[in-house]
Amino acid sequence: MEKEKLEKRLLKYTGMASALLGAQALPGQVIWTDIEDTTLSNNGDFYDFNIDQDTAGVIDFRIVQLVDSSSFDFTGVLIRSGNSVFNQVVGKTQANYNYAARLYLGDTIMPTDTFQGINPGRNIGYLAFAIDTPYPNSQWADTINGVTDGFLGLRFTAPTSDSTNGTFYGWIRLDVAADLRSVTIKDFAYQSIPDSSIFMGQGSPIGVEEFEVEKPSMVQRGRFLDISLPETYRPEAQLSFYNLGGQLLRKESFQARQNRVTLENLPKGILIALVRSNGVEASRKIVVY
């Protein structure tokens, strides 16, 4: 069959299939949990997070509000990990304190980020704290306006479908008062695909879908898939092929901005190609014939 006729037929076939299948879901999704805004304002008030809502009720993280605390001798907001020392938040260690980073709508977290926002031994991470004045490394301290809609970037472990433990990423959205004497928890979410990135705000109706992100491009050319990474990306990516039932068929990595991948040895029919690169995911339907 002539190449031009074949490509026209493929385009027609994929268009018809997309119309019939609608918005075919990719394996996994971001699970968002909305709660009634909850403000902690008394010394020792806390809020526990079971991020993935497992039936065992495992506590993944705890937010604690301290007000003129005698035991800690400061006012501010703490975050603690749950049952696993591996549970962490994006942040850094500075001057022997572990500071939880304040992230913004659209920021991406991924396995390569620095998760040092909680001290594994003491199980304490500082969002903000003050004795006389806020400590300079507290990213959640704004003594004029306070912090509205700040995001905590999460990493935690949880059982997967095959009963092994996987690593998952998520976020919590918070407000912190200008005087650090109260914190308000608004909502949280996590990416249900292990080891996959998530945008701050992803999965919630607060406008992150409007956040423009440069993504890898994929173009099928017959029995090949051409993949291009933006110039701003590191030249590395992972490519996975799934059938429409969500079963992983093939997975590979590459280390270049321009890549041509053969579709040989894949089952015939409509498949989903998913590229993960620099914390961003892109997908498209392909036809193997």
Image: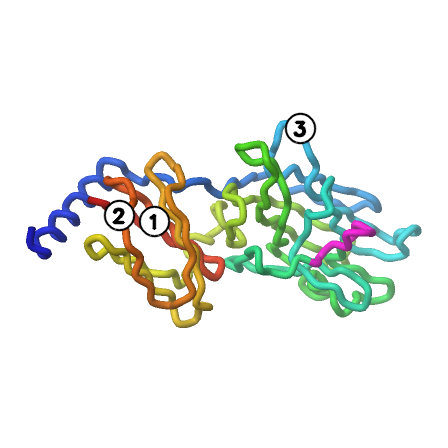
Q: Is residue 49 above or below residue 105?
A: above
Which mark is nearer the camera, 3 or 2?
2
Instruction: Answer whether residue 121 is magenta in the image.
Output: yes
User: Magenta residues?
Assistant: 116-124
**As drawn, which residue projects farthest toward the right?**
70
Q: In this view, does 223 lie to the left or right of 63?
A: left
**As drawn, which residue projects farthest toward the top?**
55
For marks 1 and 3 on the same chain, the one whose residue lies earlier in the sequence: 3
Q: Residues within 10 Å of mark 3 (few under 14, many from 20)?
A: few
Kindly state the secondary structure of the residue where label 3 is placed. loop
The colour scheme of the drawn protein is rainbow
For the point 79% across and 65% down, the residue is 134
Q: Is residue 142 left or right of residue 210?
A: right
Kindly state the secondary structure of the residue where label 1 is placed. strand
The answer to whether marks 1 and 2 mark residues whose Cβ atoms lie closer than 8 Å is yes
Q: Compute the Cα span from label 1 to label 2.
A: 7 Å
Kindly state the secondary structure of the residue where label 2 is placed. strand
For the point 32% across and 40% down, the residue is 23
Q: Where is residue 71 in the image (x, y as percent from the top left)?
A: 92, 50
Identify residue for label 1: 273
Q: How crowded is mark 2: few (under 14 residues within 10 Å), some or many (20 or more)?
A: many
Instruction: Name the residue type under label 3.
Output: Ala
Mark number displayed over residue 56: 3
For the point 51% across and 52% down, the residue is 197
- The total of numbered circles placed on residues is 3
Question: Which of these two is toward me, 189 or 160?
Answer: 160
The answer to whether marks 1 and 3 mark residues whose Cβ atoms lie closer than 8 Å is no
Q: Compute the Cα span from label 1 to label 3.
A: 35 Å
For marks 3 and 2 on the same chain, the one whose residue lies earlier in the sequence: 3
Q: Where is residue 272 in the image (x, y as percent from the top left)?
A: 33, 45
Identify residue for label 2: 286
Q: In this view, does 148 lie above or below 163?
A: below
